[in-house]
Image (tube, rainbow, N blue to C red):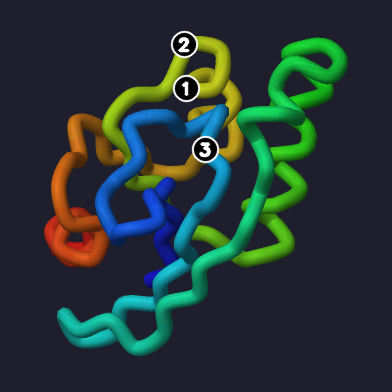
């Protein structure tokens, strides 16, 4: 399962999803992280450039390009939650602490 989580520079869950500067895309296989790729998104800057709809479209494109199957986050705004529901992506909220541990917990 491929999951995406916003991360800080020290490997913690970033509390910001739509304004995260970096996210990790992890492939979890048999309860283990098979791959972990951290990607600079600059969403904190891009979030305020244009409309909310254009930012949501940017996030959709990222998730599709990376074949993400679930999102792990601390908090996500209602508009983004609706968009992720439209994509039928499971969302695991209230994640905190070590990002890798949060991904493994969500992958269950």
Element at label 3: loop
- Residue that badge 2 annotates: 78
Looking at the image, residue 33 lies above or below residue 84 = below
Query: Which numbered disc flags the more N-terminal residue, 3 or 2?
Result: 3
CB under 8 Å between callouts 1 and 2? yes
What residue is at 61 percent from the left and 65 percent from the top? 67
Identify the residue at image location x=41%, y=23%. 76
Quadrant of the snapshot with the C terminus: bottom left
Whole-percent x and y of residue 15? 33, 31
Could you give the CA–CA distance between mark 3 and mark 2, rounded to whole angstroms? Answer: 16 Å
Q: Which residue is mark 1?
A: 81
Give the residue number, with chain letter if any, for mark 3.
Answer: 20
In the depicted structure, whether residue 23 falls above or below residue 92: below
**Residue located at (53% from left, 60% from top):** 68
Tell me the quarter of the image containing the N terminus. Answer: bottom left
Residue drawn at (28%, 81%) of the image: 33
Marks 1 and 3, the one that precedes in the sequence: 3
80 relative to 28 in the view: left or right: right
């Amino acid at each position: 399962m491929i999951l995406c989580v916003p991360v800080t520079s020290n490997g913690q869950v970033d509390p910001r999803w739509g304004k995260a500067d970096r996210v990790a895309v992890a492939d979890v296989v048999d309860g283990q992280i098979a791959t972990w790729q951290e990607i600079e998104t600059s969403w904190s800057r891009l979030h305020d450039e244009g409309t909310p709809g254009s930012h949501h479209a940017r996030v959709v494109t990222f998730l599709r390009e990376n074949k993400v199957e679930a999102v792990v986050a601390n908090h996500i705004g209602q508009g983004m939650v609706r968009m992720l529901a439209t994509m039928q992506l499971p969302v695991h909220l209230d994640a905190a602490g070590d990002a890798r541990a949060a991904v493994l917990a969500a992958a269950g």
